[in-house]
Amino acid sequence: MEPDEPGTSGVATKIMPLAFPKGKEKYCELCQREAYIQCSECQVTFYCNADHQQADWVGIHERICQMLVPIRAMKDIYDPSVRKKNQLRKRHLIKICTLVAQSKLSEGKGEEALPAAHCCLQTSIDLYGPNTIQLVPAYILLAEANMGLGNLAVVAELLSQAEWAVLKNPELGASIQQQLHRSLGQFYTTTGNLETALFHFANDIYFACEEYGLDSSATTKGYFLIADVFARQGKTLIVHSLYSEVAERWHKHLSSLLETHQKHADSSVDSSVSFYEKSQRVEMEEMLRVMLEFEQKQSRRDVNHIALIAHNLAMLWFVSGDLHKERFLKKVLLAAAGNRMKACSRRFFSSTTICSFLRKSDFVLLQHCMFGRH
């Protein structure tokens, strides 16, 4: 393939067989088949065809192209200091690939997440060796990317490898076990084995409580996923109860974040961006939207619960700096305030009586979004 061939991103050139030692065949970064082209920028990444080169460039390679040069060019390193430096580079690469894959998955871009997840697993194997416990997060990440694309056979194989690694290490920390049970629960939900899914989601919550505490917001995704299973079974009362638990925990957590945000509002530091990674914010918003839609469709609406979920959404957007959603934000806040105090007229928001019913964080948020005050 010639450089700059239309239809590709980045620049690729044909592999020259004589440029590499005999017996050192090159394999595709994405599928491990024999490679015929290479990235002309780093010259250490290879592909079987232009489609895989383009997919890798869009998915992750554009971000890490030059990072790969010192990592992959150094083989058989005998100097301990140089080897240690290269290991640090690999750890940094794994972190970047993980964040990129998670971000793309949160946006529903499973196919674009695959290259980053593949690179994460291959670098983890290179760093820690095969069949080690450190590979479990990478197995789970790659399984999640494949799950969104319907590659269930691949997902089953990856989760089996992760499960086997965990079983061989019974003293493993609760965090990884929680991640594994969540992924297994999502897999069995997708395949329709709902009872097994419930078992794994229950373990997800158990290990999350063990790792982060009983009242931690880290447990909310487990409750949300269990609610989804019960919704599939038509058990709406249980779903409502679980959603209430999720909403209460998020409200406590987001109220605390809002207060912290206000304390730093006058500083030069942009504190809103640092509260969550993008993937976490997107996931939280999706959960809250699903919950709000579910509650609004019920024949007997719990207006207080709807208001609580709506206020969670408003606070999330506010601390995340998503003020481009201000129009819907105003509607949400009016509904939340109206349901709490039985008064939706704008003129009441500035009165001392109404202000006394609102918590300080509510009032600050209402002032900013309704009147543009700080």
Image: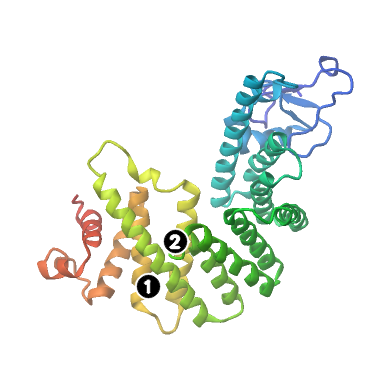
Which label sits in the foreground, 2 or 1?
2
Q: Position of residue 38 (x, y in %)?
A: 74, 25
User: In the depicted view, which residue is nearer to us: 172 or 45?
Assistant: 172
Residue 304 vs residue 299, the one in the foreground: 304
Q: Are marks 2 and 1 in contact (CB under 8 Å)?
A: no
Instruction: Residue at 80% x, 37% y: name it.
Output: 32
- Give left or right: position of 13 versus 301: right
Q: Amino acid at mark 1?
A: Ile
Which quadrant is home to the N terminus? top right
Kindly give the residue lying farthest to the front in the view shown.
Answer: 171
Q: Could you say where residue 130 lies in the image, as x and y percent from the top left? A: 76, 41
Going from N to C along the chain, the mark reached first, 2 or 1, is: 2
**Amino acid type, label 2:** Ser
Residue 255 sits in quarter: bottom left
Q: Between 70 and 81, which is closer to the camera in this rendering?
A: 81
Q: Residue furthest top?
A: 18
**Based on the displayed image, in which of its 4 quarters is residue 53 positioned?**
top right
Label at residue 216? 2
Label 1 packing within 10 angstroms: few (<14), some (14-19), many (20+): many
Q: Circle 1 is placed at which residue position?
A: 306
Q: Is residue 58 left or right of residue 244?
A: right
Between 128 and 245, the one lying in front of the other is: 128
Q: CA distance from mark 2 to mark 1?
A: 22 Å
Give me the residue at 83% from left, 36% from top: 33
Q: SS at mark 2?
A: loop
- The answer to whether 365 is drawn above or below residue 348 in the figure is above
Is the residue 113 above or below the residue 88 in the image?
below
Q: Which mark is residue 336?
A: none
Spot occupied by residue 359 in the image (x, y as percentages of width and height): 22, 64
Q: Position of residue 319 (x, y in %)?
A: 34, 51
Label 1 secondary element: helix
* Residue at (69% x, 49% y) in the render: 139
